[in-house]
């Protein structure tokens, strides 16, 4: 389990590094370089628009790679998705700016961002099921939480590289070529991840499940459509909060509040680091008290915290901004630490890779793709951007209602590793 968890964590960290480094670049430099004919605000909105395309591609990636995972095994998904995302990320670092090739520059950016999202849409399902389906039932949330540490690790790695470059280069050098270095580094990381995954075995539940689904996506659409919509709505607030903190706040504070880019990156990274460390501890609570209660508590905390978080951000004081971000990240991880066990337990094994991944990534469309764009538009006026807090509170209430309608899935009895035992609660 340690080896499996480490390989899953490393893979998701690399894939999310690829995904997050684009978000950081979109907040800092992509607008002027690829949309120079726009105003500063419109350029930022356009850059966040290409950022959002990656989220729109993720459900499609879930369908494509979910089909592979449900028919041919979870293991092939982990190799194919990592290869696709790594190649697309390296290519982003090679795209010439608008001044060199004109409209082809943002077009290529859009295509490569779509391919990034396609690969990431498949990665989560493969990595999570590899650990969840090997894990003993009474510790499934704990072991399945290790891929959930991957986003935190990938975010810290991406922003750490950007922070080092930002500190070591002049602003002109960073905008000229420095921003490309993190994208090029994705190639080496992808090779490392592929090597770590070469010795992984297929999951026992896949080997024992019998005849695979012929078209998993059709079975999910016919028999589990309500469950997919509920999980997508439930997860929307997690994505919205994370990308408000990690992407929109970076652009807002540096452009509107005049906060130094390095200071903002440190504040955000510190909050995400604490979140990553606490992820397995939150998952242990999920094994003890259940998945649904933890999700409801985290979602409720998010609703309560959005207005204080925005107020603390508006102060432009580093310690206060960090406190606001930390509160949001702690509420976020109460939900997302157990999601890697919760979603697979809601589906039968024959459609699990497709169903869990589609619901997870549709939540990303609802919460992640739109939030930086909506938040940027809502924060156009002077003063504290209360509209952003109101928007996030509304999304949180929607997610809270969806979580309330989902069943509990924590296994009632201890199962031995590899037994294939399923929770007593019937899938919705």
Image: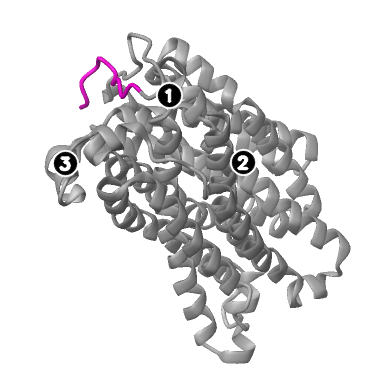
The label shown at residue 165 is none
Q: Is residue 144 left or right of residue 271?
A: left
Rendered image quadrant of residue 175? bottom right
How busy is the neighbourhood of tag 3: few (under 14 within 10 Å), some, or many (20 plus)? few
- Magenta stretch containing residue 384, yes or no? no
Residue behind mark 1? 295
> Quick one: quadrant of the C terminus?
top left
Q: Residue at x 38, y 47 (%)?
A: 361
Magenta range is 419-428
Q: Is residue 416 left or right of residue 207?
A: right
Q: Residue at x 56, y 66 (%)?
A: 89
How busy is the neighbourhood of tag 1: few (under 14 within 10 Å), some, or many (20 plus)? many
Q: Closer to the observer: label 1 or label 3? A: 3
Residue behind mark 2? 152
Q: Residue at x 23, y 41 (%)?
A: 351
Whole-Å distance between the Cαs marked 2 and 3? 37 Å
Q: Indicate the secondary structure of the residue bearing disc 1.
A: helix
Residue 124: image location, x then y, percent: 44, 45
Q: Are marks 1 and 3 in contact (CB under 8 Å)?
A: no
Q: Is residue 377 left or right of residue 186?
A: left
Whole-Å distance between the Cαs marked 1 and 3? 33 Å
- Render colour scheme: one colour
Q: Closer to the observer: label 2 or label 3? A: 3
Residue 194: image location, x then y, percent: 55, 55
Whole-Å distance between the Cαs marked 1 and 2? 19 Å
Residue 10: image location, x then y, percent: 59, 44
Q: Is residue 162 above or below residue 93?
A: above
């Amino acid at each position: 389990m340690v080896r499996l968890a480490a390989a899953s964590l490393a893979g998701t960290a690399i894939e999310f590094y690829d995904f997050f480094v684009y978000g950081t670049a979109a907040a800092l430099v992509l607008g002027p370089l690829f949309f120079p004919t726009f105003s500063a605000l419109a350029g930022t909105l356009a850059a966040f628009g290409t950022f959002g395309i990656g989220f729109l591609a993720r459900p499609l990636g879930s369908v494509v790679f979910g089909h592979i995972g449900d028919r041919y095994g979870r293991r092939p998904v982990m190799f194919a998705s990592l290869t696709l995302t790594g190649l697309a990320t390296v290519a982003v670092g090679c795209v010439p700016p608008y001044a060199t090739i004109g409209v082809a520059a943002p077009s290529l950016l859009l295509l490569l961002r779509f391919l990034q999202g396609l690969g990431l849409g498949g990665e989560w399902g493969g990595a999570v099921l590899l650990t969840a389906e090997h894990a003993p039932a009474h510790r499934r949330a704990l072991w399945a939480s290790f891929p959930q540490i991957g986003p935190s690790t990938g975010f810290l790695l991406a922003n750490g590289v950007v922070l080092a470059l930002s500190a070591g280069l002049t602003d002109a050098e960073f905008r000229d070529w420095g921003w490309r270095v993190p994208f090029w580094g994705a190639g080496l990381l992808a090779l490392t991840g592929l090597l770590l995954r070469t010795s992984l075995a297929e999951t026992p539940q896949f080997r024992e499940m019998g005849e695979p689904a012929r078209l998993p996506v059709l079975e999910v659409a016919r028999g589990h459509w309500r469950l997919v919509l509920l999980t997508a709505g439930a997860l929307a607030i997690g994505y919205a909060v994370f990308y408000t903190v990690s992407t929109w706040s970076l652009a807002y504070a540096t452009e509107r509040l005049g906060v130094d880019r390095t200071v903002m990156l440190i504040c955000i990274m510190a909050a995400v680091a604490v979140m990553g460390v606490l992820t397995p501890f939150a998952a242990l609570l999920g094994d003890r008290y259940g998945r649904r209660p933890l999700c409801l508590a985290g979602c409720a905390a998010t609703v309560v915290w959005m207005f204080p978080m925005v107020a603390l951000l508006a102060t432009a004081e580093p310690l206060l901004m960090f406190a606001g971000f930390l509160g949001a990240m702690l509420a976020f991880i109460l939900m997302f630490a157990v999601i890697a066990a919760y979603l697979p337990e809601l589906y039968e094994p024959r459609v699990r890779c497709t169903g869990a991944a589609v619901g997870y990534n549709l939540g990303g469309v609802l919460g992640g793709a739109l939030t930086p764009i909506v938040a940027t538009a809502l924060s156009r006026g002077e003063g504290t951007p209360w509209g952003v807090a109101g928007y996030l509170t509304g999304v949180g209430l929607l997610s809270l209602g969806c979580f309330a309608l989902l069943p509990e899935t924590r296994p009632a009895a201890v199962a031995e590793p590899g037994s294939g035992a399923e929770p007593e609660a019937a899938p919705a």
